[in-house]
Structures are given as C-alpha cells and as structure tokens.
Amino acid sequence: EAIKFLVILHRYFEPTRRSLLQLCQLQQACFDAGGLLDFNPQTSWIREDLTWKAASPAPGLRDCRVEITGPVDCKMIINASNSGAATYMANFK
C-alpha cells in the first residue's frame, strides 16, 4: 500500500519536479556566467503596494531564541544565563 502511494506521488509530482530542476539548472548556469540575483518581476505588485503588510508571526514563533544544553558547572550556567536563550537544560550526567 505504501509503494502504491509513492507511485501515485511520483506520477503526480514528477513533471513538476523535473521542470523545477531544469529551471534551477538554467538559473545556476546564468549565475555561473556572472548573472546577478534580482527580484521576481511577477511579484512586483507586492513591492509597489505601500499598504501591503506581511501577517504577524504565530504566537509560538515570536520568541525564536534557542535552548542551550550543557554541563552543570558554574561557568557554563553563567554563560547560558547571559546568552539570551529562552531556557537552559542542565545535563547532570
């Protein structure tokens, strides 16, 4: 059943995958020849619309600081406390 599902996915997405891969290869060849990155002209309306704003991040994504895990020694705990990380998980092993 899983193989059948994978076959369906492959048949459905393979043309798109190949098309995107070919586009990536063409873009890479352009960059290799000295071409520069630029904005997508199809999205110029977003850049030109001064009233357009992105949605606010979801509540769980507002604080993106990291969690630090480390040994239980004074120096590490002090450094972790001063790092700005949201949490410190002490490893008592």
Image (spheres, rainbow, N blue to C red):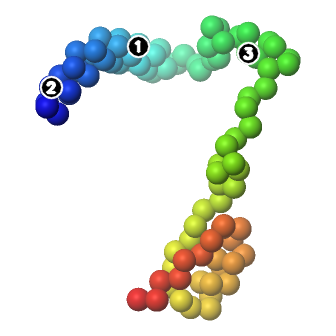
The quadrant holding residue 10 is top left
Q: Residues within 10 Å of mark 2 (few under 14, many from 20)?
A: few
Classify the position of the N terminus by image quarter.
top left
Rendered view: 63 above or below 32: below
Image spot of residue 34 (x, y percent): 52, 18
Callout 2 amino acid: Lys
Image spot of residue 73 (x, y percent): 56, 91
Between 88 and 19, the one nearer to me in the picture: 88
Q: Name the residue at 60% across, 75% down.
A: 88
Image spot of residue 25 (x, y percent): 37, 17
Pair 3/2: label in front? 2
Lower sequence index among marks 1 and 2: 2
Callout 1 amino acid: Leu
- Marks 3/2: CA–CA distance: 41 Å
Pair 3/1: label in front? 3
Rendered view: 15 above or below 7: above
Q: Residues within 10 Å of mark 3 (few under 14, many from 20)?
A: few
Q: Which residue is mark 3?
A: 46
Q: Which residue is mark 2?
A: 4
Q: Residues within 10 Å of mark 1 (few under 14, many from 20)?
A: few
Question: Tag on residue 23?
Answer: 1
Lower sequence index among marks 3 and 1: 1
Side of 64 where 19 appears, left or right: left
SS for tag 1? helix
Lower sequence index among marks 3 and 2: 2
The quadrant holding residue 40 is top right
